[in-house]
Image: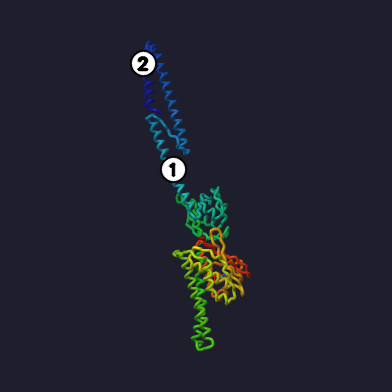
Amino acid sequence: MNIKNHNFIFKLTFSYVFIILISFGSAYLFHAILPGLFIALGLAFLSSLLLTRDMTLKLHKFVRISDSFSKGDFSHKIFLDSKDELGELASTLNSMAQNLEDKIHEIEIKNQHLVAILESMVEGIIVVDKTSRIVSINSSVEKIFNISKQNLEGKVFLEVIRNNDIAEIINKVLKKGEFTSCELTLMWPVQKIFQINASPIFEKEEVSGCLLVIHDITEIRKLETMRRDFVANVSHELKTPLTSIKGFVETLLEGALEDKENNRHFLKIIQEHGERLNKLVDDLLSLSHLESKEILLEKGIFNLRQQVEKVIMGFKEQLKKRNVDIKNEIPANISINADKDKIEGVFTNLIDNAIKFNREKGVIRIYSQQEGDKIKSIVEDSGVGIPDKDIPRIFERFYRVDKARSRELGGTGLGLSIVKHIVELHGGTVGVESVEGLGSKFWFTLPNL
Ligand code: ADP
């Protein structure tokens, strides 16, 4: 309400009332002033009516726009051209609305950043309230538990993720208000190991929820197991020849040295074990070199058939001894761009195995095929073959179908893993097809020129 206008009406009305009172004193005056009095009262009533209407309209505007502010709609502002108290109130409301709009925008941006961070995290994130109902969940959780995060908010955790162990962790955190961490193995859809960190969320010093961070540590655990197995395998592989060498040296020292019939035989065994140790150390060194990131391939273009021929020459004695025939069927015109020495190593390992695990009068065929933009080389033998159950693990370090036979034949169990590393360093792949008792086909691909 405009106070100045009020004063004016009041003064006007008061003046006329005063005049009326004076007028009562004189009938003449009464007759003369009465019409003026009515006119003045009429005018006062009319102006007050107009002012009230104007005020009501302004107040309606205030109510309507304040209502849209309260609903978060700041697109309209209160425009009043008056410079009175109502005008001031309108501009205060407008600037308050502007501040609110800016703050809400700022919060929205921060919220978007937070969502982007949560969504890009590889760890699964779940937030539940104090009644174990889901408040928020990120996309990684979908992948971990094979669920869809659509419409999950508000649902009880156990209804969505049927895992009692995690539900128990949540209950513990909600009850005690303390950080809890544990390791969990999920068997489905595939076996995975997770590290679960659960922290309480506080609101006014009371536990209001729980934040779960789920790390997939399957690979870390796998690597740890592999490292443990590797150390155990290496120790075992070293121990066998070393024990034999030690035993035979002791036998010789205890008198067998003078035994003309056997001393050379004992020395021969020591030599063989020494060679095995040497081969094992060589293979371990090549493997660690291939696995180190510093390795550089010395690539060059060379003829594949000629290179294989050179490798075969080195096996002439062994082939003759085992009565195995070998055929190099690689076309004469195939050239590849690769590290010549390393590819020679691949063929050496594959041909060595094809001879070692072949049968008497067996055959070996070496041929190649063009496969898309790759050259596929195949070493096929007619040997003992590999049982189906062993095929998936055959390229693992120290994996051998028949340990005793492999050792007897001077194998270290590292040849195929060296082959795999070399081929993969070149951007190719390795594989095997085998039928137990009939033979095996070891193959690898290399990018074309
Ligand atoms: P090594 O030959 O030194 O034992 P490898 O890594 O070269 O080690 O081979 C691992 C195992 O794979 C061998 O012990 C053998 O059991 C199997 N294997 C490899 N090549 C053949 C083959 N051509 N035929 C049958 N078995 C094979």
Is 372 or 124 nearer to us in this picture? 372
Q: Residue at x 55, y 70 (%)?
A: 351
Where, quadrant-wise, is the N terminus in this rendering? Answer: top left
In the rendered image, residue 323, in percent from the top left (x then y), is placed at 59, 76
Could you tell me which secondary element the residue under label 2 belongs to?
Answer: helix
- Disc 2 crowd rating (10 Å Cα; few below 14, some 14-19, many 20+) is few
In the rendered image, residue 425, in percent from the top left (x then y), is placed at 49, 63
- Disc 1 crowd rating (10 Å Cα; few below 14, some 14-19, many 20+) is few
Check mark 2 vs ligand 1: CB closer than 8 Å? yes or no.
no
Is 248 or 143 nearer to us in this picture? 248
Is 374 or 432 nearer to us in this picture? 374
Rounded to the nearest whole Å, what is the CA distance between mark 2 and mark 1? 67 Å
Query: Residue under circle 1?
Result: 105
Q: Amino acid at mark 2?
A: Ile
Is 309 or 4 nearer to us in this picture? 309
Q: Residue at x 51, y 83 (%)?
A: 267
